[in-house]
Image: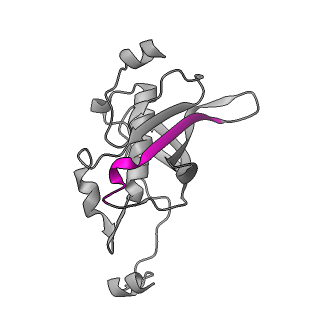
Amino acid sequence: SSLEYRQREFPRHELLGSLVPGGNGKDFIFRNMLKESDVSWLKDHKLGDTIVFPGSGYLAIAMEAITQLTGIDRTAHPSFRFSNVHIMNALALSAENLSQTEIFTTLRKSSLTNTADSSTWWNFNISTYAGDSSVSHANGSIAIKATETALVAKYRAPKDSLEPTAKRTWYEK
């Protein structure tokens, strides 16, 4: 554990944190303490007066984690695929607890059978731990490809099929 910690390949990431040393080689756990000084834009992401961690932040955490674990070069502009992503609980922050929020990200290769794992897909879970309780915020599956891939829409809505909605209606709901 000590050697892994001292010879880390990647520095601490502002959202992901660092890989916890001494794992089992199957479950990879990253730990981070959110710091307002590291994530200055976070205090501006609000719903009303409440600071809320953005949903895209969970995806960015998963992308950074799989990039570090696979060792794929970022300069090659890798592409990512997500599947079955669920954002279950909002991560509401206050100015006081922003520097005390501990985030854990777990990645594990997706199981194909009881004895075989996927070579491309990973399951991720992002949770927080405060006091004596853990809250799971997001989970899903992610895959990374070393080269850039063009986006292709899987579903297309017919033109004029969506009704415009006033922002105030959304905020009222």
Residue 60 seen anywhere in this rendered image of the structure: yes
Residue 80 seen anywhere in this rendered image of the structure: no
Please identify the quarter of the rendering in which residue 8 is found: top left
Q: Is residue 5 magenta?
A: no
Name the spot of residue 166 as percent of width and height, x first. Answer: 34, 86
Name the spot of residue 35 as percent of width and height, x first. Answer: 30, 46
Q: Is residue 77 left or right of residue 138?
A: left
Q: Is residue 170 above or below residue 35?
A: below
Q: Is residue 106 magenta?
A: yes
User: Which contiguous range is marked in magenta?
Assistant: 95-110
Is residue 88 or residue 100 the one in the foreground? 100
- Looking at the image, which residue is at 27% across and 31% down? 75
Is residue 44 or residue 163 the one in the foreground? 44
- Looking at the image, which residue is at 39% across and 87% down? 169
Is residue 8 or residue 161 the one in the foreground? 8
Residue reaching furthest top? Answer: 3
The C terminus lies in quadrant: bottom left
Name the spot of residue 11 as percent of width and height, x first. Answer: 31, 28
Q: Is residue 90 above or below residue 62?
A: below
- Looking at the image, which residue is at 44% across and 45% down? 102
Name the spot of residue 23 as percent of width and height, x first. Answer: 55, 24
Number of marks in picture = 0
Please identify the quarter of the rendering in which residue 69 is found: top left
Residue reaching furthest right? Answer: 114
Q: How is the image coloured?
A: one colour
